[in-house]
Every structure is written in structure tokens, then in C-alpha cells.
Amino acid sequence: MTAAAFPTVRFTEGATPLEYLPRLSAHLGGPAIFIKRDDLTGLTGGGNKARKLEYLAADALAKGADTLIGLGATQSNHARQTAAAAARLGLHCVLLLERRLEGQREEYYNAGNALLNRILGATLCDEVPAGSDMAAAAAQLEAELVAQGRKPYVVPGGGSNALGAMGYVGCSQEIRVQSAGLGIKVHAIVHAASSGGTQAGLIAGLGAHRGTTVRGYSVRLEATRMADIVRTIAQETAALLRAPVEELGEIEIDDSHIGSGYGIPTPEALDAIRMLGRLEGILLDPVYTGKAMAGLISDINAGRFSRGQNVVFLHTGGAAALSAYASWL
Ligand SMILES: *Cc1c(COP(=O)(O)O)cnc(C)c1O
């Protein structure tokens, strides 16, 4: 089976571009770097949650839902894309956000994705404290909405279950077709990892066709825990595809670019944001893609990837949060 066997609603027209980055590649003096532009997916502001939501929103519609419940941190791209998906489909959206960072500047709580959520018409619950059990809080919210006669659908955190990860099975297929079109062999796909669905989907999608490494730069959890989460979702995704689970191989996670914690920019991530802006005119973000690019740069400097290899940086989005981090930049 392929990802195309499962129902979707389309939020992106056609494939996102796979582009060569000549100036960045020359600047770093290592492998040829390509970028998969999932920051250009079709849901407001783009990002990797759009592919997951194509499957999850179809599931919600099939179940007769009238409301999407979205979960995330204050500046969650996932919550904003869930709000956008609901708007596109004429559904209500209720967002349950975790105040994972205290003591930030006013803009952190009001600009960026927080602003977009309001424009997109989402209903915002009071933020819950950092470390709350979000699944339990979502279940309680779901029960309250049911009691009011609504038909809510809880979108899992980050859209990361087997069905959501199917979006990245599809993306791996796109990369395979596009890289063949460019006549290149992809040695590695690298990207930011947090709730695990992106990496799990890529791994399940590449399956036995490996030879391409998938390297996740964790922005939140230490490597062992992150790898456990990715492995579990990848196995569930492979099972849904009726693909052999034993061929998934190693889960590669680098957790050395988290810095002080989730959502707190590192100097290297801020440098990477400026570097991509100035060399290629592409916007990264301080929470995810800036840290992932900092990881790729340090891996190239350490000789992990070398001249003659082709590395695909999967741009998972996030620039919608930039204005919330204005003072850092
Ligand atoms: C959610 C997110 C990620 C992480 O993807 P997961 O599937 O949750 O691991 C990476 N980058 C951006 C911009 C995101 O919003």
C-alpha cells in the first residue's frame, strides 16, 4: 500500500519544490545542499503540519466532526495550521495551548502564531501550565464540547500519530521522484524533530529503499526518548501501510542543538537564520529549522557529510513565529 490509499483533503496543490542551494553549498564547502520547501505547503503560512492535517482532517470529516481541537505550545505552528485547516473546511477550531515558556516579552504571547490564531478565528482556551498532561486536558475539553452538543475531533499533538505521519510517507515519495528527476542520489534527509511524526513518516516511507539516512535534530527531547517516540510511530505507520516493520533500521537523532530548551533560541540558530536569509533569501525560524540548520552546519564542519554527497534539508516551516522573536533577531 502507499500513502495515496488513504483519504485526504488537499491543502497543497502539487508537490512542494526541491531546490538546490548553490550559495549555501559553496559557503559551507561540503556536500551539495538541497532544500525541500515544505514551508510552502498550502495552509496559511505553510509548514510540515499541513501534510499531516490532510489525512487527519479527512478522518475528522469522515467521522462527522464539526470542531477540530488543536494542541500545542504558545507559538505552536501546528495549532495555527490546525486553525487554518478548520477555517478552510468550515469547521470550528478550539485551541488548547501550553504556556511552555514564562517570562518572555509581550510579543511572544501576542505576535507570530498567536496573532494568526486570532485572525483565523480559533477559539482559544486559557493556556494551561507548562508540563500539563495535554492528552488528558484535551480529553476533558472534548467531553465538555460533547456535553454542549458539539462533535469534536482531537488532532494529536504535532499531528503525530500513524495517520498524520502518512503525510511524510507521501513526502518521501515526492523526494524520491524529484531527486530522480534532478539525477541525484540523496545521501541524507535532515530536519528538525519534535513530536516525531515527520521523521517517522519519512522512515516508513523510505522503508526498504534506504541508502538514504534520515537525521532528526531534536529541538526538545533528549535523543533516546526522541528515538523511542519516532520508532513507535514509524512502526505504527508501517503497519498501517502493511509494510515490513523490521526494515525500518536505526533511528538517527542528534540532540546537541536544543540549547537551553524548547523555544529558546541558540546563538547558532540565530546565525543560521541570518545565513539562510542573506545567502538564499529563505526564512528559517528560531524554534525548529534554525536549530536544525545549525545542526547541519556543525555536522558538515565535523566532516559527517562531505563533498560529492547530496543532502536534503527538509524545511518544515515556522517562519510565521519570527515576529514573536523580533527582539532576539
Ligand atoms: C512541528 C514542527 C517540526 C517538528 O515536526 P514533528 O513531526 O513534530 O517532529 C519541525 N519544524 C516545524 C517548523 C514545526 O512546526
Image (cartoon, helix red, strand yellow):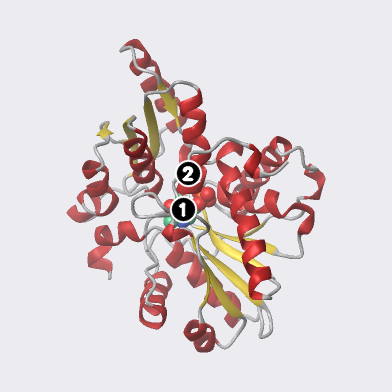
Q: Position of residue 158 (x, y in %)?
A: 47, 43
Quadrant location, the N terminus: top right
Q: Position of residue 254 (x, y in %)?
A: 59, 62
At x 36%, y 81%, the residue is: 278
Q: How crowded is mark 2: few (under 14 residues within 10 Å), some or many (20 or more)?
A: some
At x 34%, y 33%, the residue is: 96
As drawn, which residue projects farthest toward the left? 106
> From the viewer's perspective, is 176 left or right of 280?
right
The amino acid type of the residue labelled 1 equals Glu
Residue position marked by numbered label 2 in the rendering: 10
Q: Are marks 2 and 1 in contact (CB under 8 Å)?
A: yes
Q: Where is residue 297 in the image (x, y as percent from the top left)?
A: 53, 77
Q: In this view, does 210 lie above or below 77?
A: below
Quadrant location, the C terminus: bottom left
How far apart are the alpha carbons under marks 2 and 1? 7 Å
Local SS, label 2: loop
Is residue 220 visible to the viewer in this orientation of the structure? no
Q: How crowded is mark 1: few (under 14 residues within 10 Å), some or many (20 or more)?
A: few
The amino acid type of the residue labelled 2 equals Arg
Residue position marked by numbered label 1 in the rendering: 13
At x 22%, y 48%, the residue is: 115
